[in-house]
Amino acid sequence: MCFGGGQSQPSVITMPDTGAYDRQFDRQLQLMQMSQSSQLTGLQSQLDASVREQQAILTELRDLEMEKAESVASVEAEARRMSNIIGAPPPDVSAKAPVIAEQRKLPKTQSAKGKRGLRIGRAVADSSGESVGFNLNI
């Protein structure tokens, strides 16, 4: 027993009701969890809605791309049909037909045979010498 401060009566230590503190803490914790879970639920529903919107937009985009591809294919098919109707373009002016066997038998212009036929024809050089080399006229 403790007689603190000159008192004649013994001090009584009363134990506080800790259960009340525990219950108060539990209530506050539940309120916080409920508010957080409602916020969480709201955010989750917003997320779900945005994902649904995104899926709808992606579906529309896919449909547009398929429609575009089908239209391109139909245009290409129409172009193929038109090219078949029109036919091949006329040959180029510079294009020549290959030499066939009958044309080989036709007489050619007479050219020299042997070594002489391989020579390149040139004009005869000027014998005055003026056009050859470096000429100084002083």
Image: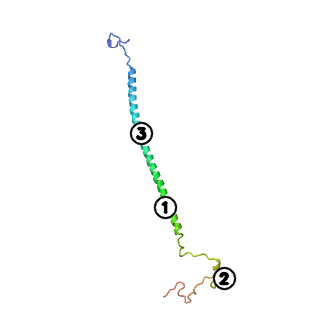
Which residue is located at x 46 percent, y 52 percent?
A: 63
Q: What residue did someone put label 1 on?
A: 75
Q: Inspect the image, locate mark 3, and give the three-letter code of the amino acid beneath it.
A: Ser
Q: From the viewer's side, name the closer residue of 91 and 125.
A: 91
Looking at the figure, which quarter contains the N terminus? top left
Q: What residue did someone put label 3 on?
A: 45
| Dot placed on the residue nearer the N-terminal end, 2 or 1 | 1
Pointers 2 and 3 in contact (CB under 8 A)?
Answer: no
| Dot placed on the residue nearer the N-terminal end, 2 or 3 | 3
Q: Give SS at disc 1.
A: helix
Pointers 1 and 3 in contact (CB under 8 A)?
Answer: no
Residue 14 appears left or right of 74: left
Question: How far separated are the C-alphas under marks 2 and 1?
Answer: 63 Å
Q: What residue did someone put label 2 on?
A: 115
Q: Give SS at disc 2.
A: helix
Q: Position of residue 106 (x, y in %)?
A: 64, 82
Question: How far separated are the C-alphas under marks 1 and 3?
Answer: 45 Å
Q: Position of residue 56 (x, y in %)?
A: 44, 47
Which residue is located at x 40 percent, y 37 percent?
A: 42
Above or below 25: residue 101? below
Q: From the viewer's side, name the closer residue of 125 and 61.
A: 61
Q: Position of residue 115 (x, y in %)?
A: 66, 82
Which residue is located at x 48 percent, y 59 percent?
A: 72
